Every structure is written in C-alpha cells, then in structure tokens.
Image (spheres, rainbow, N blue to C red):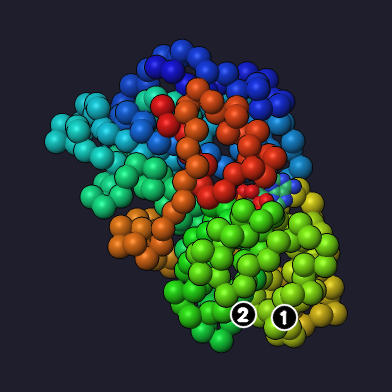
Amino acid sequence: MHAVVLHTFGPAENLRYETVEDPVPGPGQVRVTVKAAGVHFVETVMRSGKDDGLTPPLPELPAIFGGEVAGVVDAVGPDVDAVWIGRDVVTRFGKPGGYAELAVADLSSVREIPAELDYEAAVAMIVTGVTALELLYIAKLTPHDVVLVTSAAGGIGRLAVQYARDLGATVIGAAGGPAKVAAVRELGADLAVDYNEPGWEKAVDGVTVVLDGVGGEKAQAAYDRIVPGGRFLIIGAASQQEFTPDPDRDVTVVNALLMLLEGLPDAPDFEGQALAAAAEGKLVPTVQAFPLSQAAAAHAALESRATTGKVVLVP
Ligand SMILES: NC(=O)c1ccc[n+]([C@@H]2O[C@H](COP(=O)([O-])OP(=O)(O)OC[C@H]3O[C@@H](n4cnc5c(N)ncnc54)[C@H](OP(=O)(O)O)[C@@H]3O)[C@@H](O)[C@H]2O)c1
C-alpha cells in the first residue's frame, strides 16, 4: 500500500509518500480500505521533533502518523465474522497509522458510519467532534453564558460555536482574517471578530467562558475579558506559547486537555453522540481535504494557519 512515512523529524516535506507492506488484521481485528484520514495540528509539532512537554511523546521513527480513519472493511482477522467485510466504518485507532491506504483496528474500536454521513464527515467527528463535545461537557454552559471561542473557524472551533449556540449561550467567535471571520458569522455566532487586528478584544464584553486552543497573546487578551466568576478552558496551544493567568483574579482556569488525557470519569458515549449529532445535522463538520500523497502540503497549511475546519487526507 501507499502510506506517508516520516523518517526524520523536521519540516513538512520530510513526510514521504511511499510504498510499504500491507497491514494484516490479527485476531479481533478488521482491515479498512481508508477513504478519509484525520490530520491533527499536534502532529505538525510532533513531526517537527519538538518535545516541549505540551505535546504527546515523540514516536519512534520511521513512523506513520494519524490514527483516525473512515473507510470500508476489506478483510477480517481469523476469528472475526466475515459479515463485516464491505461495511463502512470509522475508528480512532487505525494502525500502523492513519496516513495510509490501509489500516487495521480492533473490532471493539470500530463504529459503523451512519448512513447520512460521508467518510470525511465521519472521520472529522470521531476525534475532533468527540473532543468538541467533551470540551463543552466540561464547560457546562448554560443559556446565561457568554462564550468566547478562539480559533473559531478551526476543526474544534466550528463545532464548539454550533454546539454552544444550540445550548442557547451567546457565542463570540474569534479567528484570524476576514475569510475565517465570515465563516464564523455564517455558523451563527452572535459576534465574530478578527483577532489578527490589534485591539480586537475591545469589541468583546461580558465574557463568562473562554474556550481556547491557541494560547499566548490571544489567550491572554481573551482571559482579560472574562468577568469575575468566569472560567477559562484550555484545549491546546496552537501558538505554542503559554499565557500566565493572574492568581488574584476570580477566574477559574481549567486544563481541559489534561482532563481529557487523564480520562473523564463516567463519560457518556461521546463517539456515538458525535456521529449521531452530525447524522442529524445538529453539528455540521466542515472538512478541508488533501490527497494522501499531499500530506506534506496539509501539514504546511496547518502550520501557516491556512486551513479552516477539519483537515483530512483522502487516498
Ligand atoms: N482536533 C482535536 O481533536 C484536538 C484534540 C485535543 C486538542 N486539540 C487542540 O485544540 C486546538 C484546536 O485544534 P483544531 O484541531 O481544531 O485545530 P485548528 O483550530 O483547526 O487549527 C489550528 C488553528 O489555530 C490557530 N492559530 C493561532 N495561532 C497559531 C499559530 N501560531 N500557528 C498555527 N495556528 C495558529 C489558527 O487559526 P486562526 O488563523 O483563526 O488563528 C489555526 O488555523 C489545538 O491547539 C489542538 O492541538 C485538538
């Protein structure tokens, strides 16, 4: 099969489209012909070889990145019912990695794709959709909340804006540049602001909750707009910069990312919920697709903030 292999940490062009051995499904596993594979911002940081404590541990090389794939089961392990062959499925645990034409996964990790969803939407929901639901679960928004979402035109951001609106909260979406701001407005945000413009935060008032995946200066400006008693949820730091909350302020800072990594106790079935919400049209994922052979371009686009919505690779 073809796969995208990283042999040396470094720039995006180090991602090589190569021929590797087909994976074989073992006991309890199915093999999937990949139709769409998810790409994550954090994978660009890992690919570069940065090990700053903010990202997961670096993989051993050579490595095939990714794990979430949607596609068609084309083979099953020795003890798996052949009835699975031909079914449309999605999983977050594809091996040897998601950036490939074929992936194997434990049957227990596989979900059938609802008929209403295409492969790209399914793969967008299985991790990024789930993360958005988890973030909103931790945030416990009420219709009285005024929520500010940073990177609001991004993979998580777009879903968070839709979900927060659905809950009845007032939603402010902040994103970089006029095109992204227009997209956030179209999603139904009550206010959409361009946080590349100096002083953007002055247009923002009465914020009770911030959902932030950017960090650095933008997070700082968002934090400063929170009213006493409010909360600031961290889901990532795309800027790779931290910000320093003021310990004397009456604002609760929640490291939601850490909570997710540690596992939420008594969590509902977020995968099922995320797929159902998209199937029902309650949450509409926006996808930016690149050919699998162009994985390096997908990484470069993510790093240069040129993407919007969820980035996927299509073999
Ligand atoms: N997707 C997931 O499942 C998941 C899971 C756990 C954590 N996270 C974290 O949550 C955050 C959002 O994830 P996402 O997948 O939805 O990504 P994303 O928002 O689609 O992409 C990253 C965005 O961050 C913004 N950004 C601001 N400063 C940046 C910089 N210096 N370099 C690059 N981008 C910058 C850009 O949007 P603007 O141009 O609008 O600023 C960029 O498009 C990230 O920190 C990610 O690591 C994501």
- Tag count in the figure? 2
Residue 49 placement (x, y as % from top left): 72, 31
Q: What residue do we see at 49% from left, 60% from top?
A: 159
Label 2 sits on what residue type?
Answer: Val
The residue identified by callout 1 is 205
Crowd tier of the residue under label 2, counting other residues whose Cα lies within 10 Å: few below 14, some 14–19, many 20 or above? many
Where residue 20 sits, quadrant-wise, is: top left
The residue identified by callout 2 is 146
Up the image or down, 207 lies above or below 195; here it is below
Label 1 sits on what residue type?
Answer: Asp
Residue 262 in sight here: no
Q: What residue do we see at 30% from left, 50% from top?
A: 117
Residue 8 placement (x, y as % from top left): 68, 20
**SS class of the residue under badge 2?**
strand
Up the image or down, 121 lies above or below 87; here it is below
Q: What residue do we see at 46% from left, 51% from top?
A: 286
* 3 horizontally vs 52: left or right: left
96 vs 6, nearest the viewer:
6
**SS class of the residue under badge 1?**
loop
* 162 horizontally vs 269: left or right: right
Mark closer to the observer (2, 1): 1
Residue 47 in sight here: yes
Say whether marks 2 and 1 touch (CB < 8 Å). Answer: yes
Disc on the earlier residue, 2 or 1: 2
